[in-house]
Image: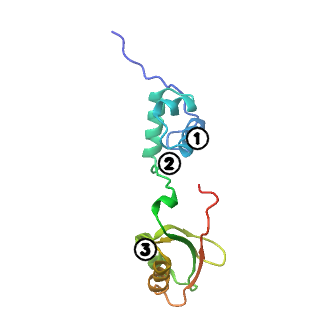
Amino acid sequence: MSQACPVALVPRTVPLGGPLDRTDRRIVEALTANARLPMGKLAVRVGVSRRHCRLRLRELESRGVIRGYYVELDDSALGPHIDAFVRIGLPLNRADACRQLETVLMELPEVLEAHLVTGESDYLVRVRADQVTGLTALITERLAKLCPNTQLRTSLIVRTLKRA
């Protein structure tokens, strides 16, 4: 009676949990282009067996390299809405204001993205509202009242040329 020996189908070139090796990068690149790619096709593109591809994918998910799979929507299908970038500048030396702002940004459903940035502003936030009055209310009633002397600059998004 023979015992099964563990066989490495494609040897790892880096330690488990370390940086991504070539196989991991191929998986990530293929899924970035099409997150709905069936496992068989993904394995073929990466050049490994389905089983090995599945194991690698689970490892990437458990390590947090792949944190989720998303749907890209056609904005026109969502009905009328207005998107804008809001640049937020906080007063100097106001760590409490930063924490408070970040908490609020994470909770507001109108906030699609929020980034701490360098330059003239402290934060760059992408927001969406159903109409101009909703955008105005978001800016004047919620964001502007968070901290005295907060600077807000808003730019309406007319058209998106490229999205990641």
Numbered mark located on residue 65 in the image = 2
Give the x, y percent position of residue 101. 47, 78
- The correct choice, above or below, for 93 with respect to 35 in the image is below
- Is 136 placed above or below 47 here? below
Image position, residue 2 (x, y; %): 36, 11
Residue in front for this viewpoint, 55 or 138: 138
Distance in Å between CA atoms under marks 2 and 3: 25 Å
Label 1, secondary structure: give it. helix
Gap in angstroms between the C-alphas marked 1 and 2: 10 Å
- Using a 10 Å C-alpha cutoff, classify the residue at mark 2 as few (fewer than 14 neighbours), some (14 to 19) or many (20 or more): some
Task: Identify the image quadrant of the C terminus.
Answer: bottom right
Q: Position of residue 108 (x, y in %)?
A: 42, 72
Return the residue at label 1.
Answer: 25
Give, as a three-letter code, the residue at label 3.
Answer: Thr
Which quadrant would the N terminus be assigned to in this image? top left
Q: Amino acid at mark 1?
A: Arg
